[in-house]
Amino acid sequence: MDRRLYEASARGDVTAFLDLIKEDEELIKQTTFRTSNTVLHIVTKFGHLDLATEIVKLQPEMVSAVNEKIETPLHEACREGHVELMKLLLKTDPRVAYKLNLLNESVLFVACGRGQFNLVKELLPDHSWLLLLEDDRHTTSLHVAASAGYNDIVKEILKARPDIAWRKDFHGCSPLHLACSKGHLDITREFLRLDPDLSSLQDKDGKTPLHSAAIKGRVNILYEILSTSLDSADMVTQQGETVLHLAVKNNQYEALRYLVDALDITNLLNMPDNDGNTILHLATAGKLTTMVQYLVTKTNIDVNALNSKGFTPLDVVETSGSSSGTLQLIPTLQEAGGKRCDQLPRGSAKIQPLNTENNNTEASVLNERQPLPSTRSLGSPANLYRHNRRRHHSGRREKQRRLHMEGLTNVRNTIIVVAVLIATVTFSSGVNPPGGIHQDAGSLLGKSQVGKKTAFKVFMVCNNVALFSSLGIVIVLVSVIPFRRKSIMTLVVATHKVMWVSVSFMAAAYIAAIWVVTPSGRGTKWVLVAVLSIGGGCMISIFVGLMVMLTKHWLRKLKWRKERERRKKEISPNSSVSRVEEELRYSRKKGGSYSSNSDLESSENDGIHPF
């Protein structure tokens, strides 16, 4: 590329650039050496909107030109966060947004990787389909944003496509794994607020987000996950390692102390991995003096457990060679009652079994848990009270959530049954219409005897609407299998409304049929009035009653959402304390209770809620 042209492009000097192009129109087509950048690549990189506008006027096809990395000028604009330039390029050629670079990265992926929130916020609403380009990729825009700690970008992506939170990269890591490993507390809260079950996802090695946090010693992340899902502490890796094993192996003393002191995981203290090693074996093998002293003095750990080689922790220390750490560990273990394997009474030595069960499953959960935590393992009475309150609250929330899911499933099944019944009744009425059919031979054979009456026409229209709307409900419900609460709720609400239409038209068809078969005469008019009054009165009364319930439910939900927004303002976003714990404190102070589901929260006292 001509040096003068490059300098004018880099400076954004419109006058100098246009003068050069007037001298030689072919200059605008030149590219840089090696990188093959066009002048538009250079201009968009430095954010010169005026010059970019002139170039697009002269060469609009340059918008889709690619460099050596197969990147368009739009990639450069998104990488540097130039929103107005992005709008200009997309307006000139909207198709350029589909182009991927040499690494199969979309313009959205590039912007997320650099934390360009303002650009992502402008790009996503009208181009959310860019996320579909990542369906064939392992690492998504959400992965890079969560790993880098771009909380605002994570929120925007989850708003557009929350299902991406379940995607895994090449190593089997979800975005929550990456956020927990890097210690991004706010992003971790966003994912757990979206779906607490995300904490149960495992990578290729069987590690969960809780394991990732323990490996890096992220105590605040550990607290956040466990305050949402206590069961995640029981999950093990493919090597049979618990969260305690990983904390010890990576010398994360503070994480180990928190896990042992504050939570009900005393059953994990003596849990062996696939090699039969308890956490005390690992701590002694690593010469972790502080950890060993803490475990043997502050916990009820078995100091004479045998691994698969038949070694006690004391054997592990003595066979690892002499060092200053060894000299400190041996008396510490002996004072706690530690012995060599040959010193143990015959028959009392039990080799720890290999923990190979469920290695290849997605959720390897330990089978047994101690029913009650020991006071010693929970630390102070304040910790015991806090733990019991959190555990009680988590159990109650989980029970409510489970009952709610069962209720939605039962409603879905009930709608199918009702729709089938409506279809059966209306089909039978359609082929055997009220008023009878002509039996005499002739052109009217098989035709309705009252087909010209207005009442019969009303009956046929209403009957057909009820029939085909109910058939539509059945087809949709047996064809779609939702597996998340929000999806089930959306499907049930939609089909429930259609069922109301079907039932209403079936009721109207019945009234019209009674109208057809009721003889016309002075003494029979009251029959039609009575049927209309009874049928219409019942339907309207039920409908009005349900609408009153629904209106109250909406008002409660609106009040709940306002209260939640007020809580968000009063609770510091930079707090290291769990969001769940803070909201519990807030709601207790206000005399209420906290729930992550607005339907459950607003109807907790009634125990039911309408659609």
Image (cartoon, rainbow, N blue to C red):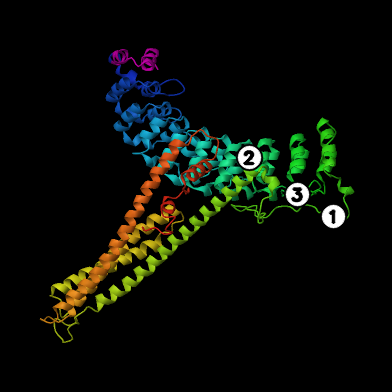
Q: Which residue is mark 2?
A: 214
Identify residue type, mark 1: Ser
Identify residue type, mark 2: Ala
Q: Which residues are magenta?
A: 1-21
* 201 vs 591, nearest the viewer: 591
Using the image, tell me which numbered label, if any, was put on residue 348.
1
Q: Which residue is mark 3?
A: 276
Indicate the position of residue 311 as horizontal and vertical percent values.
82, 46
Identify residue type, mark 3: Gly
**Please, what secondary structure does the residue beneath circle 3 have?**
loop
Q: Residue at x 58, y 41 (%)?
A: 223
**Please, what secondary structure does the residue beneath circle 1 have?**
loop
The answer to whether 581 is drawn above or below residue 4 in the figure is below
Residue 217: name its quadrant. top right
Q: Is residue 4 left or right of residue 459?
A: right
Q: Is residue 28 left or right of residue 394?
A: left
Can residue 160 be seen by looking at this rendering?
no
Dividing the image into 4 quarters, which one contains the C terminus? bottom left
